[in-house]
Image (cartoon, rainbow, N blue to C red):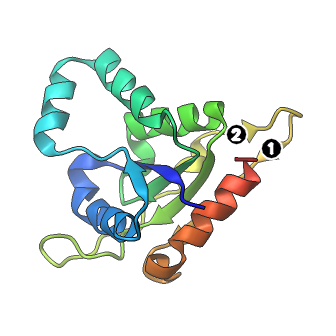
Amino acid sequence: MARHTFFSFHFERDVWRAGQVRNSWVTQDRAAAGFWDSAAWEEVKRKGEAAIKTWIDDQLKGTSVTVVLIGSETSTREYVGYEITQSHKKGNGLLGIYIHNLKDSSSKTDTKGANPFSNWTFKDAQGNVVTYPTYDWVNDDGYNKMGNWIEAAAKKAGR
């Protein structure tokens, strides 16, 4: 089943790496949300925090899974945190994919970042602690396996 998936990531630092992941997803005829170009990002940023959160909320509509692309600084990014908590609240399946081993536009890799899901304790409707899986794009063969990871996250969330 095709999933409409929201991709969360640190725009300024990881847009090149995130683009590689996104391109592998959409070339398989799947929908992706959460991507914007630098001009659009600058325009929304100028409008302030409320505009950014409204844009995020709009992008999450119709999605069933949120994939957090984890770079070196992702876990400290305010809006990534907002995207994670909003995704959990709306019942999206969630998973993380470490992208630090992907090369950037200068053909350099990065240092592995902290798991952003560790910033919260998530609970389901019954009060049970919920954990979200993480994978490594390079070491776990994300190009070929991301669809399976997304489908598993959706099923775990009952989506």
Report crowding for label 1: few under 14, some 14 to 19, many 20 or more residues within 10 A (C-alpha).
Answer: few
Mark 1 or 2, nearer chain start: 2
Question: Residue 126 in the image: x percent, y percent?
Answer: 89, 34
* Residue located 22% across and 62% down the image: 16
- Look at label 1 and name its amino acid: Val
Query: Could you say which is closer to the camera, residue 32 or residue 130?
Result: 32
Residue 77 lies in quadrant: top left
Residue 124 visible here: yes
Between 38 and 62, the residue placed more toward the observer is 62
Instruction: Report how many numbered discs are placed on residues in the image.
Output: 2
Q: Quadrant of residue 122?
A: top right
Looking at the picture, which amino acid does disc 2 mark? Thr
Q: Are marks 1 and 2 in contact (CB under 8 Å)?
A: yes
- Residue 132 visible? The answer is no
> Looking at the figure, which quarter contains the N terminus?
bottom right
Q: Residue at x 49, y 57 (%)?
A: 114
Marking on residue 129: 1
Helix, strand or loop for disc 1: strand
Task: Say what secondary structure mark 2 lies in.
Answer: loop
Residue 70 to residue 145: above or below: above
Q: Which residue is mark 2?
A: 121
- Farthest-out residue, right: 126
Q: CA distance from mark 1 to mark 2?
A: 7 Å
Please give left or right for residue 139 compared with residue 48 in the image: right
Q: Nearer the viewer, residue 46 or 3?
A: 3
